[in-house]
Image: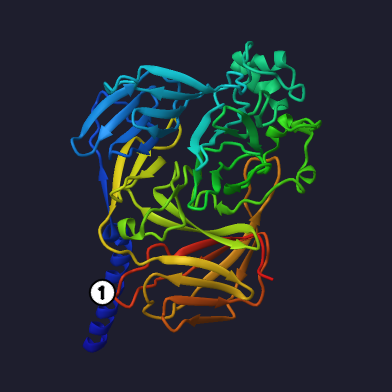
Amino acid sequence: MNTLLSASLLVVLLSHLMFSAMVKAVWYDYYAIERVDYPIEIDPQVGGLTAMKDGRLALTVMHGDVIIYDPESERWDVFASGLHMPLGIVEEKPGQFLVIQKPELTRIIDTDNDGKADQYQTVYDDFGMTGNYHEFAFGPVVDTEGNIFVALNVASNFNGVFEYIRGEYSDLCPPKDKMQQWHDFEKWKQGYRKKVTRMFSCAPYRGWVMKIAPDGEVTPFASGFRSPAGMGFDDNGRLWVTDNQGDWIGTSPLHHVSEGDFAGHPASLHWKKGWQKPHSEIEASDLLSLRKPAAALFPHGELANSPTKPVKTIAKSLFGLPEGEMLLGDMNKNHLIRYLPDEIDGTLQGTLIPFIAGNTLGIGNYTMDFSSDGALWVGKVHMNWAGGEGLLKITKKKKPFLIESVTLHKDGFQITANEPIEAMPDSVSITHHTYHYHAKYGSEKVDVTNVVPAKLTLGKSRKQLFITLDSLAENRLYTIDLGEMVSVNGKPLMGTVLRYNLIKRVE
């Protein structure tokens, strides 16, 4: 081989390897991930986490404790004990917290300021429980007017119900005596279980988001959820709820939730006023006029399997992300995910983009919160499923190069970066698809369509990439792969695959 040609090929190869290494290292170039040392006597499964006003963290752990962790002194203290599967916590004021347990929402108070809770108040327990293992409770989150929101999981037909239940038993469900046969599990598995819907809501208000007003009044706020493990408010006071892929849910969604919404899972309709049709007889055609499309969709097995709590971003100077977007985790995937909203004539849709990733982050990223100094704290849990354990601290090392917004136009997308783009992408790969809406568990991608851009254009500032398309399809998830993209300063793009859920076109 010609020596000059060989040298040229070597340069090209080395350049490619250097670029690949730069892309792979991008997460760690921009952010530092630190695993916090955990005392052996503290349960490492974190179900709830909130950054307190004084800089400490309050954690709920699966063994039933509330733990206070001081990052400055590295001190761990047990604040409260004896709770039942606490999966969320909010600080109301110094020495006072709201905690969601499996059976109730509880206010926990340290009245004598000795660092230990001495008062436990039931705030809300007027919801049904059949004893089914899958009847989790999630939240709480609190809006600016002091209203508290919690979400209630539906039950699973891997078990049935207990003899003694809390609350009314729905007459739209199978007979209670039949549902109790699960105690002989082999008989249940081969017998009556096959007649029970995959998930069910036989006690109120499984599958609902509930609103508790400051005066204690409770409102069934929104329905149609299967396993709404994550709740959060954005900067505009809008409520966001994640759900998990399963029966009636083709792939995991992120919902913008308003009062009266129905998110798509029909089990909860047993508790809707005037509803008369049993879940087992419901067909998709019964629900199309009720169902509100999800604002975002996580392709199952690619972007997320079980998305978790959405948290709003903080000042860009502290963490590097644009304010106004949401950040989420997932139980089975070792990356965090950004959500960039885009509102079209009152409809909220938008883009999901992978964020910090890798084995150092790991999986099981269930609950997150920002402290006032700009650190993102991540608590991990597995509850005997997929997931992880422990506490992480993530901090910004330097300004990342990332996509700042994705907005829909009449003829395509405008993608805006936070720094000038070095060059037009060599190629932009685009597909769109949808999912089945049916009672079966999950859905494959449906109607996958390749889309060839009509034109790609860089704006004058080189921060905007305009993708012109010949047509746009509603109710399709668009996947836009930007390939290898760098800034004018040679910084690799953080998150090159964009998933825009197009519900409504621009007129």
| Residue 96 pos. (x, y %) | 38, 28
Of residues 347 and 136, the one nearer the viewer is 347
| Residue 189 pos. (x, y %) | 63, 22
Q: Which residue is mark 1?
A: 14
Secondary structure of residue under mark 1: helix
Would residue 155 be visible to someone looking at this image? yes
| Residue 358 pos. (x, y %) | 34, 51
Q: What residue do we see at 60% from left, 20% from top?
A: 129
423 to 391, vertically: above or below = below
64 to 306, vertically: above or below = above
Three-letter amino acid code at the position of disc 1: Leu
Looking at the rendered image, the quarter that the N terminus falls into is bottom left
Query: As drawn, is 489 to the left or to the right of 366?
Result: left
Of residues 199 and 343, the one nearer the viewer is 343
| Residue 343 pos. (x, y %) | 59, 61
How packed mark 1 is, by other alpha carbons closer than 10 Å (few <14, some 14-19, many 20 or more), is few
Query: As drawn, is 352 to the left or to the right of 349?
Result: left
Of residues 75 and 430, the one nearer the viewer is 75
Query: As drawn, is 25 to the left or to the right of 85?
Result: left
Query: As drawn, is 90 to the left or to the right of 133?
Result: left
Q: What residue do we see at 30% from left, 19% from top?
A: 112
Of residues 213 and 345, the one nearer the viewer is 213
